[in-house]
Amino acid sequence: MGCFKATDMSQQLQHLMCQILQLRNTNTKLSNASDALDKLRFLSVTDPNLLKDGVDLDIRIQTDKDNGIITITDSGIGMTRQELVDCLGTIAQSGIAKFLKALKVHQYLA
């Protein structure tokens, strides 16, 4: 199968798993940043002041190779305290899907 010792293979597998988890974490953070931008866009329809200063809707990615850190920031609107409480411990819940559902309900009631 190859000329790796069992410990070498275990170390390589552990390294690969760490890389996969870091990539998944990064993808989740990018998705969250995208949701924050979507939220700002949707809320600005009813409150144009949110974009009055010519806010750039962007996601910025910075890397710190020396410390192995990736920093992702966005110019969107994050979650409220209540949204954080409601979603605490929830895995893979689409914030934008929930927001769009609430928007449809609001439009229906208006």
Image: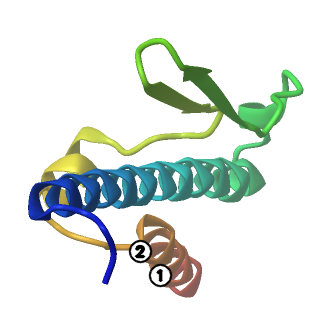
Left or right position of 35 against 78: right
At 59% from the left and 23% from the top, the residue drawn is 63
**Disc number placed over residue 101 in the picture, else none:** 1
Q: Residue furthest right?
A: 54
Check disc 1 and report its element: helix, strand or loop. Answer: helix
Which residue type does callout 2 highlight?
Lys
Of residues 31 and 104, the one nearer the viewer is 31
Q: Residue furthest front?
A: 3
| Quadrant, the C terminus | bottom right
Q: How many C-alpha atoms fall within 10 Å of the one at disc 2: few (<14), some, or many (≥20)?
A: few
Q: Which residue is mark 2?
A: 98
Res 51 → quadrant: top right
At 53% from the left and 19% from the top, the residue drawn is 65
Res 74 → quadrant: top right
At 24% from the left and 40% from the top, the residue drawn is 81
Which residue type does callout 1 highlight?
Lys
Against 44, residue 54 (above or below) is above
Q: Position of residue 100 (x, y in %)?
A: 54, 75
Give yes or no for contact between labels 2 and 1 (Cβ–Cβ under 8 Å): yes
Marks 2/1: CA–CA distance? 5 Å
Res 57 → quadrant: top right
